[in-house]
Amino acid sequence: MLRVELYKLIVRPRTWLIIAVLTGLPAVVGILLKVTGVAPRPGTGPPLLAEVLSNGSLFPVAALGLVLPLFLPVAVAMVGGEAVAGEAAGGTLRYLLIRPVSRGYLLLTKLATVSIFVVLAVLVIAGVGFIVGASLFGVHPLATVSGQTVPAQDATLRIFVAVVFAMVSMLGVAAIALFASVLTDSPVGAGLGAIAVLVCSEVLDLLDAAAVLKPYLPTHYWLSFVDIFRFPILWHNVTRGFLIQGVYILIFLGAAWARFSTKDITS
Amino acid sequence: MSAVIETSGLIKHYGTVTAVERLDLEVEEGDLYGFLGPNGSGKSTTVRMLLGLVFPSAGRIRVLGRDMPAEGGAVLPGIGAIVEEPGFYGHLSGARNLALIEAARRDDTRAGRRRRIGDAIDKVGLEGAARRPVKAYSTGMKQRLAIAAVLLRRPRLVILDEPTNGLDPQGIHEIRDLLRELVTHGTTVFLSSHLLGEVELICNRAAIMSDGRLLAQGDVSQLLAPTGRVRVETPDVGAAVELAPSIGGVTVHDRTPSAVVLALDGKAPEELNRVLVEKGVRVRELVIERRRLEDLFLDLTGHQTADRSAPSEGNRDSAAG
């Protein structure tokens, strides 16, 4: 079943189109940086982008920073929203279920497939980011945001943790999208629903009056992976980020399962 | 003979709407069972409940001797079904779609699987199109592919919802033969349809639904029992009508310029024929009148139409169409 779902994911041109666009944007940004040499002023612009000019090995993380606030979550929401609602709209959901595939297993497989898409997208972005960064800016010992130089091994580890952090953040989005996907038979509706949740979260996150809520918003810690490149690492927000995403993943998957396992399939 | 499908007191509400009201169905092993009803009568909801897609509000469903939907995992592998339109992945080929369905099974080698897929595709006559993407298929071809998917499973029970929709007459004929063949090999077929002629032609048992209720269920031959009337085609209609009251108990039910319908009141048709001929009425044709499924259906569902008293070729055509 997972093999079948992965096959469906891989043979879809859409999957690769999304990944191509997701990696294309950072590449273009990299080239612009190289050509103009104009870095965002400190404290503004996408995270870590200024540092990239002096060290290409940070570019994978900067690339993720570029697509993480908007582009990647939208892609994950669309793919996640499509997971079950797409089968319903295409008339294949009922045939899957009488094949038979149990509802819980179908949901798990869909989650695994969306997760693999997330991992694939993040890895490709990071990988292409590394190649682009290394070839344009060269690889140097990593200087942290705080100014110290760290050994290559430590730097690799930090980049790895940052990439994992981005994956987990996106898995939170995937869980929300999957929940939306079992509520409706419209894949676009499900994707937009998940995006709407994220937009609300972003808006509240900008609002001082919502200060109490902020630490619990799904998008609040998305960009906290910058803290991994401080010296010493500021774990507080990173840990909170991991925890919050874990909670969101559990809640929304639980809700998705509760709804899907008792739903009348009339599509 | 054991029950392959058995429902008792089956009820389904959608909010305040009652889709199915206390339904008791019984389908025996080896039946070719016709499940009839107008659109919106609860047929599809019932089919979906049999397959565990829709959960009943109350009542009990047993399929292949087990409870549905609780034991769906054990029941469904024995069922092949088409539920409304076929559902395939349009950008993949017909053969690839079947392979995805087969991939869920672990009980065969790769070569065996390929051969079964090939066989199923041959059986429904899609050899030439197996490598083309399904989105390029016509409605009829998709329907054939769906039937191939059903055959692939070698099911004990086949549940079909309007399987001949979108098929040309040739295709309908082939499906009919296929269903008969399935039944000869011991498969039970549950055929949901609104095509009365089709059901009348091939099914041995039938049920009629309307507004979520079961109106009739039984052997097709019984549902279509003789009406106790004969239709006599003759150029001497006037003489036959005059003669009728003199033959014990026979009354005139209806007459046209070229035929008369006589109610026999227990008299043997051959006896009537003898008397008519002896008295000089030239009988061209004498037919025992049977109810058509269409008549029964329209009677039961309350949609009365004009002149259903006699079977005619025109009637037959419209019912089979």
Image (spheres, rainbow, N blue to C red):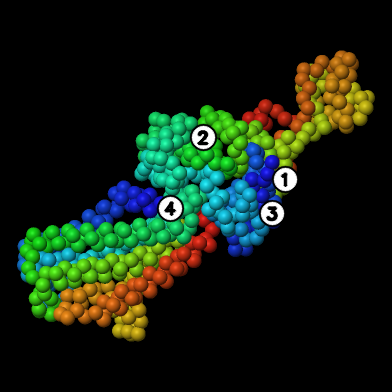
Query: Which residue corresponds to mark 4?
Result: A87
The structure residue drawn at horizontal position 36% and vertical position 43%, both measured from the top left corner, is B92
Please report whichever mark, 3 or 1, sits nearer to the chain's N-terminal start.
3
Query: Chain under label 3?
Result: B
Labels 4 and 2 in the same subunit: no
Judging depth in this view, the residue of B149 and B293 nearest the camera is B149
Left or right side of A98 for A28: left
Does residue B131 appear in this view?
Answer: yes
Labels 3 and 1 in the same subunit: yes
Q: Which mark is residue B167?
A: 2
| Circle 2 or circle 1, nearest the eye | 1
Please report whichever mark, 2 or 1, sits nearer to the chain's N-terminal start.
2
Q: What amino acid type is highlighted by mark number 1? A: Ala
Q: Position of residue A126 (x, y in %)?
A: 19, 62
Please report whichever mark, 2 or 3, sits nearer to the chain's N-terminal start.
3
Kindly indicate whether the residue at mark 1 contacts the one at mark 3 (C-beta within 8 angstroms).
no
Cα distance in 3D space between marks 4 and 2:
25 Å
Relative vertical location of residue A17 with respect to residue A223 in this rendering, above or below: above
Quadrant location of the N terminus of chain B in the rendered image: top right
Q: Secondary structure at mark 4?
A: helix
Query: Chain under label 1?
Result: B
Cα distance in 3D space between marks 2 and 1:
28 Å
